[in-house]
Image (cartoon, helix red, strand yellow):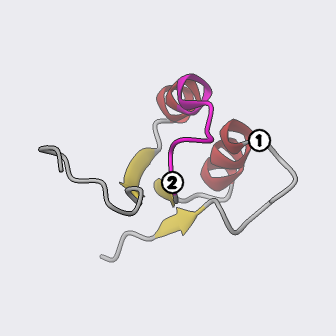
Amino acid sequence: MINLSVCIEMFWRGLPMDERIRRVRALGFGACEFWGWRNKDLAAIRRSLDETGLTLAAICAEPGFLPGGP
Protein backbone atom coordinates (compact mmCIF):
# COMPACT_ATOMS: atom_id res chain seq x y z
CA MET A 1 0.00 0.00 0.00
CA ILE A 2 1.25 3.48 -0.85
CA ASN A 3 1.51 5.98 2.00
CA LEU A 4 1.13 9.55 0.79
CA SER A 5 2.65 12.59 2.44
CA VAL A 6 0.94 15.97 2.12
CA CYS A 7 3.22 18.99 1.55
CA ILE A 8 1.63 21.46 3.96
CA GLU A 9 3.50 24.39 2.43
CA MET A 10 1.08 24.24 -0.48
CA PHE A 11 -2.24 23.82 1.34
CA TRP A 12 -4.18 26.19 3.64
CA ARG A 13 -1.53 28.87 3.16
CA GLY A 14 -3.27 31.33 5.48
CA LEU A 15 -3.13 28.98 8.47
CA PRO A 16 -0.26 28.26 10.87
CA MET A 17 1.63 25.04 10.26
CA ASP A 18 0.28 23.31 13.37
CA GLU A 19 -3.31 23.80 12.17
CA ARG A 20 -2.37 22.51 8.72
CA ILE A 21 -1.07 19.33 10.37
CA ARG A 22 -4.41 18.83 12.12
CA ARG A 23 -6.20 19.23 8.80
CA VAL A 24 -3.99 16.63 7.13
CA ARG A 25 -4.92 14.16 9.88
CA ALA A 26 -8.62 15.07 9.61
CA LEU A 27 -8.47 14.17 5.91
CA GLY A 28 -7.13 10.72 6.83
CA PHE A 29 -3.49 11.05 5.78
CA GLY A 30 -0.71 9.66 7.96
CA ALA A 31 2.22 11.90 7.01
CA CYS A 32 3.12 15.46 6.10
CA GLU A 33 6.16 17.40 4.97
CA PHE A 34 7.22 20.99 4.57
CA TRP A 35 10.02 23.07 3.10
CA GLY A 36 12.60 25.05 5.09
CA TRP A 37 12.51 24.98 8.89
CA ARG A 38 14.05 28.33 9.86
CA ASN A 39 10.82 30.37 9.70
CA LYS A 40 8.62 27.76 11.43
CA ASP A 41 7.39 27.38 15.00
CA LEU A 42 9.02 23.99 15.49
CA ALA A 43 7.66 23.53 19.02
CA ALA A 44 4.07 23.99 17.75
CA ILE A 45 4.74 21.62 14.86
CA ARG A 46 6.13 18.99 17.25
CA ARG A 47 3.07 19.30 19.53
CA SER A 48 0.69 18.91 16.58
CA LEU A 49 2.57 15.88 15.28
CA ASP A 50 2.46 14.31 18.75
CA GLU A 51 -1.24 15.10 19.22
CA THR A 52 -2.29 13.76 15.83
CA GLY A 53 0.14 10.86 15.50
CA LEU A 54 1.11 12.17 12.07
CA THR A 55 4.57 11.27 10.75
CA LEU A 56 6.85 14.01 9.50
CA ALA A 57 8.05 12.50 6.23
CA ALA A 58 10.46 15.21 5.05
CA ILE A 59 11.86 18.68 5.59
CA CYS A 60 13.93 20.39 2.92
CA ALA A 61 17.32 21.57 4.17
CA GLU A 62 18.47 25.09 3.50
CA PRO A 63 20.71 25.55 0.44
CA GLY A 64 24.32 24.94 1.40
CA PHE A 65 23.40 23.03 4.57
CA LEU A 66 25.43 19.92 5.29
CA PRO A 67 24.71 17.89 8.45
CA GLY A 68 28.43 17.51 9.21
CA GLY A 69 29.32 21.16 8.62
CA PRO A 70 30.61 22.99 5.55
Outermost residue to the front: 70
- Using the image, determine if residue 51 lies above or below residue 11: above
Label 1 vs 2, first from the N-terminus: 1
Pinpoint residue 38: horizontal percent, then vertical percent.
53, 41
Q: Secondary structure at mark 2?
A: loop
Judge left or right: residue 3 versus residue 9: left
Residue assigned mark 1: 16
Horizontally, residue 23 falls left or right of residue 43, namely right
Question: Relative to 47, does residue 33 appear above or below in the rendering?
Answer: below
Residue 70: where, in percent of width, then height?
18, 50
Q: Is residue 42 magenta?
A: yes
Query: Closer to the camera, 38 or 7?
Result: 38
12 in relation to 1, above or below: above
Tell me which amino acid carries mark 2. Gly
Residue 3: x and y, percent?
37, 69
Q: Which residue is mark 2?
A: 36
The magenta stretch is 36-45
Q: Quadrant of residue 10?
A: bottom right
Gap between marks 1 and 2 measured at Cα: 14 Å
Q: Quadrant of the N terminus?
A: bottom left
Residue 28 - label:
none
Given residues 3 and 18, the one toward you in this image is 18
Q: In the picture, residue 11 is in which quadrant?
A: bottom right
Mark 1 residue type:
Pro
Which residue is rendered at x = 67% and y = 59% of the image?
27
| Numbered disc in front, either 1 or 2 | 2
Q: Residue furthest left?
A: 68
Apparent side of residue 4 relative to residue 29 in the rendered image (left or right) = left
Q: Which residue does the image show at 54% across and 30% down from the upper left?
A: 42
**Side of 26 relative to 32 (left or right):** right
